[in-house]
Image: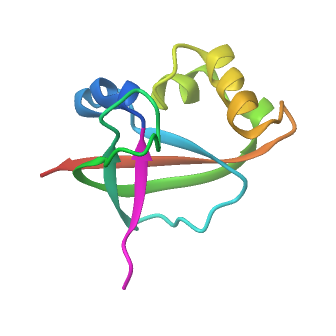
Amino acid sequence: MAMIAFHFSGSYRKAIFSGAKTCTVMKGETAFKQGQEVLLYISQTERLFDGRLDERVGKGIIEEVRVKKVGELTQKDALESGHRNLAHLKEVMKDAYGFGDDGIVSFIRFRAVFE
């Protein structure tokens, strides 16, 4: 059975280890399900997938998956996903995925278990 992983940029390191980042937002509808285990990796740099190896820091247990439009995301969603505020999260969604408030995302809440 293949293990699926979440890869985070190094800019989220502190938020993940402090427990401030408990969610991630991904483009479109995903196949992730409540109760599923995923490996957690953090890049050694601020940029994700910059060619360097990521550091495996533990695993995550998915607690909730909600599909929503970017325009339905809340300030609470933004903070739980490690962003400064809702405007910043929407800016990241636009930069990363090229869409605005009508774009579909999966909001995935997870509980980190560190090794």
**How many numbered badges does the structure rendering display?**
0
Residue at the farthest right position:
102
- Quadrant, the N terminus: bottom left
Residue 43: where, in percent of width, then height? 35, 39
Residue at position x 82%, y 41% from top? Answer: 103
Corner quadrant of residue 75:
top right
Corner quadrant of residue 35:
bottom left
Instruction: From this view, report whether residue 28 is shown above or below residue 15.
Output: below
Start-end of magenta stretch: 1-8
Residue 24: where, in percent of width, then height? 51, 41
Residue at position x 23%, y 32% from top? Answer: 17
Residue at the farthest bottom position:
1
Residue at the farthest left position:
115
- In this view, the residue in front, 44 or 82, is 44
Instruction: From this view, report whether residue 76 is shown above or below residue 22.
Output: above
In magenta segment, residue 16: no
Q: Horizontally, is 82 left or right of 17 in the view? A: right
**Which is the main secondary structure of the residues drawn in magenta?**
strand
Residue 31: where, in percent of width, then height? 60, 68
- In this view, the residue in front, 2 or 108, is 2
